[in-house]
Image (cartoon, grey):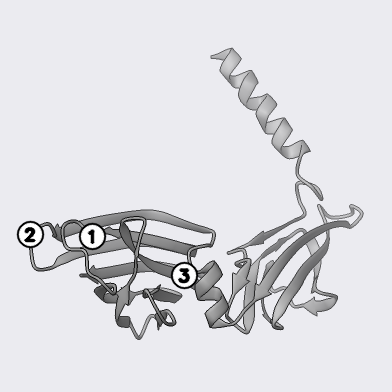
Amino acid sequence: MRTTWMLGAALALLVVGGCKGGSGVNLELDMKPQAVTVEDSVRLSGQARGVEPSLSLNGKPVPVHEGFFEVNQPLQPGDNVLTLDLSARPKEGAAPEQKTERFEVKRVDQATFDAQYFYSGISSMGSFKRVSSGGLLADKAEVKLTAKELTGVRFEEFGHENRPVKGGMPMEITLKVGQGRAKVSVKPEQGPSASAVATPDKPATLNAKAELRIKTYSVRIEALDGPARDVELVVRY
């Protein structure tokens, strides 16, 4: 027991000692921006930790209210660099410390995104459940996914089983969110991807064909403007 306690204490010291900018000064984003997007702007939000925080994005001041911030940054076509600079005191009377977060975001058109980046993205999904019914010799298969929270991009894959369809599998998709916004998309064998955006007061519905890729059909869901919560995805095919 004593050995375990000493090991835990040593690890805690390593974590605290390794915090860049001090343990009391930190930037915590709700969701990091995707490296590639078709959107014309990106929303950054989170917490600026420290006493008397002063925050800027690419040199322009960002308001901080009770430690929280939210800012929308327009994106130019091509490469964009987003630099968040925080200056704050780790405690009352201490000298200010700095913390910097830097992100590179590339904005591309839809055709380029579909051809090169559709199946890429970073994500996290907390406390999710997936239930399936039908399939095999049934006329329809149905999959329902529920999750407490979605950040970034997630791909849900669906087996073609014994019903491969030339030209793509017709998918009937419904996406609901209790908070935030989320986009659902599928990529056909030819032509542009199809997508729809869900908000708390308006579910997204999508009827489109998905291409067969590595023996599965993929549905892409992406949180927009920060984490999406109470997510429900239903796919029939």
Question: Is residue 198 visible to the viewer in this orientation of the structure?
Answer: no
Mark 3, secondary structure of its residue: strand
What is the spatial separation of the Cα atoms under label 1 and label 3, in whole angstroms? 23 Å
Question: Where residue 106 sits: x, y (%)?
Answer: 67, 73
The amino acid type, in three-letter code, at marker 3 is Glu
Q: Which mark is residue 222?
A: 3
What is the spatial separation of the Cα atoms under label 1 and label 2, in whole angstroms? 11 Å
Q: Which quarter of the picture shows residue 59?
A: bottom right
Disc 3 residue crowd, few under 14, some 14–19, many 20+, Cα 10 Å: many
Does 88 sit above or below residue 54? above
Q: Which quarter of the picture shows residue 89?
A: bottom right
In the image, 162 versus 24, the foreground residue is: 162
**Which residue is drawn at the image coordinates 63% and 21% (left, top)?**
7
Which residue is identified by label 1? 160
The amino acid type, in three-letter code, at marker 1 is His
Mark 2, secondary structure of its residue: loop
Question: Where residue 164 sits: x, y (%)?
Answer: 21, 64
Q: Which mark is residue 137?
A: 2
What is the spatial separation of the Cα atoms under label 2 and label 3, in whole angstroms? 31 Å
